[in-house]
Image (tube, coloured by chain):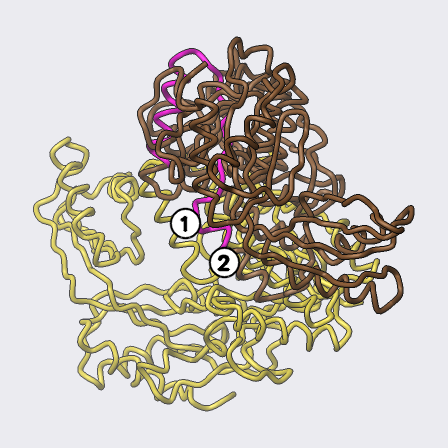
Chain colours: A yellow, B brown
Amino acid sequence: MPVLVMKFGGTSVATLDRIRRAAKRVGVEVAKGYDVIVIVSAMSGKTNELVGWVNETSPMYDAREYDAVVSSGENVTAGLMALTLQEMDVPARSWQGWQVPVQTTSAHSAARIEDIPPANIMGKFAEGMKVAVVAGFQGVSPEGRITTLGRGGSDTTAVAFAAAFEAERCDIYTDVDGVYTTDPRVESKARKLDKISFEEMLELASLGAKVLQTRSVELAMRYKVKLRVLSSFEEQSDDAGTLVCDEEEIMESNVVAGVAFSREEAKMTLVSVADRPGIAALIFSALSDAGVNVDMIVQNISEEGRTDMTWSCPVDQVKRAEQAMADAKSSGVINYSELLADQEVAKVSVVGIGMRSHTGVAAKMFQVLSNEGINIQVITTSEIKISVLINRKYMELAVQALHDAFELDKAA
Amino acid sequence: MPVLVMKFGGTSVATLDRIRRAAKRVGVEVAKGYDVIVIVSAMSGKTNELVGWVNETSPMYDAREYDAVVSSGENVTAGLMALTLQEMDVPARSWQGWQVPVQTTSAHSAARIEDIPPANIMGKFAEGMKVAVVAGFQGVSPEGRITTLGRGGSDTTAVAFAAAFEAERCDIYTDVDGVYTTDPRVESKARKLDKISFEEMLELASLGAKVLQTRSVELAMRYKVKLRVLSSFEEQSDDAGTLVCDEEEIMESNVVAGVAFSREEAKMTLVSVADRPGIAALIFSALSDAGVNVDMIVQNISEEGRTDMTWSCPVDQVKRAEQAMADAKSSGVINYSELLADQEVAKVSVVGIGMRSHTGVAAKMFQVLSNEGINIQVITTSEIKISVLINRKYMELAVQALHDAFELDKAA
C-alpha cells in the first residue's frame, strides 16, 4: 500500500469535535487505499499551559524535564485520535516518540531527528492496521530520555516520517487553506498558489509567512518530500491547498511567486566604526551573544579608515542591541561615534525562482516603489529574493503596488 | 544509602505551590541521608479530565489507548516535581513507567506490576542523584504499550517500589493525617492510631476507610513493607501519621483497633429457594455476572427443603440485582417466592487482631447495641472482624456506643 502522511496542528485538534473532523479526513484517505501515518500536535493551548508551569517552577529549567513535561500534550491527542478512528471502524493505534522510536540527538528542547526505523509501524500495517497516529514534536535520545524538537516541531516530525516511509505525499492540515502570493489581509487580490517550489517557500517562511516551520521545508527539500498545505476547516478536493515541491515539478510559474513582508523591523546604524579586518565579526558576535537576531546587513563605503555598519533586527530587540554595543564600546572591543536606531521601518520582499532566469526584476521593483514615492533605505538580494527596508507607513502601499505590478493575481 | 519511598497523591500535588511544599518534605528526608524515590499522582482533576475525554470520544474504548491518554497526567507532575527539587539544589530526575521500566501484565487499565528492575535508578543513585521522581499508576506491557494499574494505583506503585528497592519505609502523603479508630465526623472522640497491623488496615480499607488502596496494603503485607500514612498539609515529626506494619511490630494494642461503617447498604432476601446443592453458586454467579458486588451472605435454616438467602450490596445495585434474579427465575435457573429489598440499612464493624486471643468481643458488641435498643438484622464474622447490618438511622449511635464501650479513645 502507498503511505500517506497527514499532519494536524493544534487548532485542527483543539476540541473533540475537531479531532472527529480530522479523523474523517483521515478516513477518506484510507478509503482511497492509503496506509496513513497521522502526526498530531497538542490540543491548542495545552503546550502553552505546560510551558507556563515549567517556567513558573524553574526559570532556568533542566531541558530534559521540560521535554518530559511538555511532550505530554501530544500523547493525549494521539490517543484520542486513535480512539476516534477506531470508533469509525478504522484500525488505528497511537505511538509515542519512544515507541516508534523517533531517534533524536540529545539536544533537549531543540533535538534533531537522526533516524526513524520504519519496521515497527510497517509491521502493524502488514497486520492490517490502517492508521498509525504518532505524537508529533517528540523523540527519544540515545540515553532513553524524551526529547522535543522545538516549537513547531510537529511539521518536522511529519516530513521526517514522510521521508523515512517514502510516503507519496505529506499533507499539512492547518488553519489556512494554502500559501498565498501575499497576505490577503493586506492585498485583497492575493491569490492562493497551487504550487510553490521549496526554495520559494523557504524564503517566504523565513520572511514571516508562518504557514510551515522552516526546518520542515528544508528537510522536505533535502529528501524530496512532496508537501501539501491545506485547511482542516474546509471540504477538500484532491487538488486543494498548495503543493510545495521541487521546482522541476512546476511547469509554468510567474517570475515572482509572492510578496512577503515583515512589519516589526528596526534599522540600526553604527556610525564611524574603524574599518579594519575582523570588525564585522566583532560587532555581530557581540549582537549574537546578546540574543539579537540580525537579518539584513549593509556596510557603507569606507572613508578615511572609518565606515558605517547598518543592520535590521526585530523592534523588540533594539534595547538589547544598544546594551550590547555600549558594553562592547566600554570594554574597548569596538569603537564608534554613534548608534542610530530607526524603529519605524518594515521589510518588503519579492520572491521567485524565476528571477534566476529573468533579469530586470530588481529594477522593476525599485521603479514601482519610486512611482509611489516610497524611499528605499536598505537593499539586500539573494538569488531568488530582493528585500528592501522602507518606512513602515508605506508598507501596505508597497505590497499592493508590487502585487499589481508583477501581476500576482493572475496564474502563470 | 538507605532508600525511602515517598508517595504524594493528587491533592498533595494539585498546584505548583503544593508541589513545592511536597518537595520540601522530600528535601528533609534527603538531608537525613536517604536516597529517595518519590511516586507522584496526577495533579488533582487532571485524570478525571482525561478520562472524560476518552469516554466522550469512545464509550467502549480500546483500553490500550485509554492508558496512553490517561497516564500523561502523572508524567507532567513527575517532571514538575523533578524541576522543583532541582531548584532546591537537590539532584533529581523524573522517570516515566517505561523508562524504569515498571514491567506489568498486559491487562490494560487494570495491569499488575510483575517486576521493577532496580538497576537503572540504583545506577543514578550511585552517580550522586538523590531523588528519583517516578510517575505513579503506570507501567509498560511486554508488548511495549503503556499500561495503567487502575484508579488509586499510585499507592500500589509506591509499595511495589519499596519492595523492589528494599526501602526502609514507604510514606504515603495524603490529605488525612493518619488512620483513625473511626471517622471523626461521626465520633468526635475518634483517636489517630500510631500503628495498625496490615490485617486490620485491610479490613478497615475494604470497609470504607478510604485512606489506602486495598491492593497496596495487600502488597505491603506480602513483602513486609512498612507503610506510613501521613498528611502532606501539616508539619511533620518523625512519628507523624500512622504506621501500617506487621503485627509483631505492635507491642501493645487494644483488642479492637477501630469501628468501621458503611452507610449506603441494602439488604436483600430471596424467600423460599429450593435448598439443594449448588443453589448458592447459581444465585451468586447470576449476581456477579450482573455486576452486583455482594458483601455479606447469610443462609437461613432450611425448612421442608426450602430456605431463605440473604445478602447485602450497595444500595445503587439493588435494581440490577432484582433484574438478575427475575431473569434467573424466568429462565428456570432458580425458583423463589419473593425478593425483599431493605434499602435503609447500614453496616457497622469492629476490627482488631486482638480478637484472635480475646474472647467475648462479639458478645460485648451485641450487648452494647442491645443496650441502645438497636436491632441486629444480619451478622457476619471473620477472625479479626465482626460486622452487623442495622437500620441506617441508628448508625451514628452504634458507632459512638461501640467506640465508647471498647475505649478506643484511649491508647493501649
Chain letter for mark 1: A
In the rendered structure, the answer to whether residue A375 lies left or right of residue A6 reads: left
* Residue B24 falls within the magenta-colored stretch: yes
- Label 2's element? loop
What amino acid is found at the position of numbered circle 1 in the picture? Leu
Residue stretch rendered in magenta on the structure: B19-48
Residues behind callouts 2 and 1 on a single chain: yes
Q: Nearer the viewer, residue A72 or A210?
A: A72
Does the rendering let one see residue A305? no
On screen, residue A5 above or below B377? below
What amino acid is found at the position of numbered circle 2 in the picture? Ala
User: How far apart are the two marked residues, 2 and 1, measured between alpha carbons?
Assistant: 11 Å
Residue for badge 2: A42
Residue for badge 1: A50
Kindly give the residue lying farthest to the left in the view shown. Answer: A337
- Label 1's element? helix
Find residue A220 and report its image quarter: bottom right
* Residue A26 falls within the magenta-colored stretch: no
Q: Nearer the viewer, residue A381 or B19?
A: B19
Q: Quadrant of the N terminus of chain A?
A: bottom right
- Residue A324 x %, y %: 19, 41
Q: Confirm or deny contact between disc 2 and disc 1 (CB under 8 A).
A: yes
Q: Mark 1: few, some, or many residues within 10 Å (few <14, many ≥20)?
A: some
Does the rendering let one see residue A401? yes
Q: What residue sits 46% from the left and 28% below the top?
A: B181
Find residue A280 and report its image quarter: top left
Q: Nearer the viewer, residue B393 or B158?
A: B393
Q: What residue sits 72% from the left and 44% below the top?
A: B297
